[in-house]
């Protein structure tokens, strides 16, 4: 993961990071605290949290019109709200982002949407499957 993170970071710093690059970089920043280094092989990067917030703002934050961004950022905030800032505020933000994602894309995301997109894709394909199963169980 470290090598891929550094490549994405270089693109971001050069102003050459498209939407896909930005989504993946958001994920890799988050992975700095989502899993321990012995799993991710990511070196400590004190910039990761500030960069996560920068990318979050780049997409428009909670008011984004990008349902995929809202879906993935909502999951990240839901899992580790206390890492992003004030815990209760980020729990509420996670809920709003996931709701807005469904408002913009009512069919949500299936695991196939994330196929062929590396670590980011593998992680969110799993999350999409779990979300889909949860919606089916709720009858929504």
Image (spheres, rainbow, N blue to C red):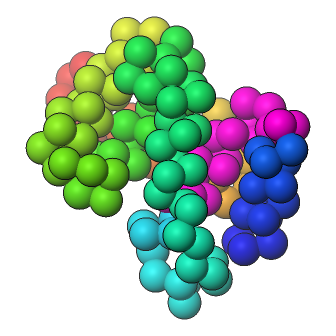
Q: Is residue 57 left or right of residue 89?
A: right
Q: Residue furthest bottom?
A: 38
Q: Residue furthest left?
A: 88
Q: Quadrant of the C terminus?
A: top left
x%, y% of residue 56? 50, 35
Identify the residue at horizontal 86%, vertical 44% (top origin).
Answer: 14
Q: Quadrant of the N terminus?
A: bottom right
Please say whether residue 50 is one of the residues in the magenta stretch.
no
For the image, the number of numbered tags is 0
x%, y% of residue 74? 37, 37
Residue 128 makes an appearance in the image: no
Q: Is residue 95 depicted above or below 41 in this figure?
A: above
State whether the magenta stretch is mostly helix, strand or loop.
helix
Q: Is residue 125 left or right of residue 129?
A: right
x%, y% of residue 58? 59, 28
- Magenta extent: 15-30
Identify the residue at horizontal 41%, vertical 15% (top origin).
Answer: 63
x%, y% of residue 96? 26, 24
Q: Is residue 61 left or right of residue 86?
A: right
Q: On the image, which quarter does residue 48 sit in?
A: bottom right
Identify the residue at horizontal 54%, vertical 90% (top origin).
Answer: 38
Residue 103 makes an appearance in the image: yes
């Amino acid at each position: 993961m470290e090598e891929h993170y550094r490549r994405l970071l270089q693109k971001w710093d050069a102003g050459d990071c498209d939407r896909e690059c930005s989504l993946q970089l958001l994920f890799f920043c988050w992975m700095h605290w989502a899993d321990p280094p012995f799993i991710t092989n990511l070196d400590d990067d004190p910039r990761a949290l500030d960069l996560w917030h920068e990318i979050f703002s780049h997409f428009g934050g909670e008011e984004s019109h990008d349902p995929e961004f809202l879906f993935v950022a909502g999951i990240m905030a839901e899992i580790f709200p206390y890492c992003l800032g004030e815990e209760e505020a980020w729990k509420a933000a996670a809920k709003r982002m996931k709701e807005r994602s469904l408002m913009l894309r009512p069919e949500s995301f299936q695991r196939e949407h994330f196929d062929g997109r590396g670590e980011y894709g593998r992680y969110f394909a799993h999350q999409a499957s779990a979300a889909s199963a949860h919606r089916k169980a709720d009858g929504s």
